[in-house]
Image: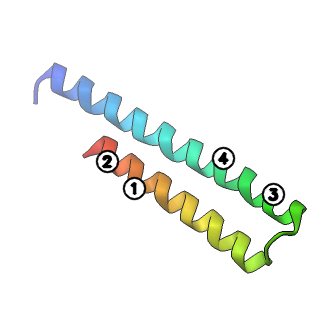
Amino acid sequence: MTTAQATEQAQQRREARDTRQNARQDARQEKRECVVSNDKSNHECRQDKRQSKQDGRQEARDIKY
């Protein structure tokens, strides 16, 4: 592996990590808003948060691989 490849791989890892972190933060915020607005049951809010996090993880995988 050359230095250029290692640098590119490191950049991809950073982008993927940032994507996951942003997804987690957004999911937390969405759940807070869901609970406060009381539009859905706690179960539905939890499922929405879980799906948001899963979407973020998939997006990070797409960046990384």
Name the amino acid, label 3. Answer: Arg
Question: Which is more foreground, mark 3 or mark 4?
Answer: 3
State if disc 1 and disc 4 touch (CB < 8 Å): no
Residue 32, compared with residue 44, is above or below; it is above
Q: Where does the image place residue 50, in percent across and percent down from the top left?
A: 59, 67
Q: Residue at x 41, y 34 (%)?
A: 15
Identify residue type, mark 4: Gln
| Apparent side of residue 52 relative to residue 61 in the rendered image (left or right) | right
Q: Which residue is mark 4?
A: 25
- The tag earlier along the polypeptide, 2 or 3, is 3
Up/down of 58 relative to 8, above or below: below
Residue 58 got which mark?
1
Q: Are marks 3 and 1 in contact (CB under 8 Å)?
A: no
Residue that mark 3 sits on? 32
Q: Disc 2 marks which amino acid? A: Asp
Residue 62's disc number = 2
Q: Separation of disc 2 and disc 3 at Cα?
A: 28 Å
Are the residues tagged 1 and 2 within 8 Å (C-beta)? yes
Left or right placement of residue 60 versus residue 21 in this view:
left
* Quarter residue 63 falls in: top left
Q: Position of residue 43 (x, y in %)?
A: 72, 79
Residue at mark 4 to residue at mark 1: CA–CA distance: 16 Å
| Rendered location of residue 60, percent (x, y) | 40, 47
- Residue 37: % across, % down: 88, 62
**Label 1 Cα crowd, 10 Å radius (few <14 / some 14-19 / many 20+):** some
The furthest residue to the top: 4
Quarter of the image containing the N terminus?
top left
Give the mark nearest the N terminus, 2 or 4. Answer: 4
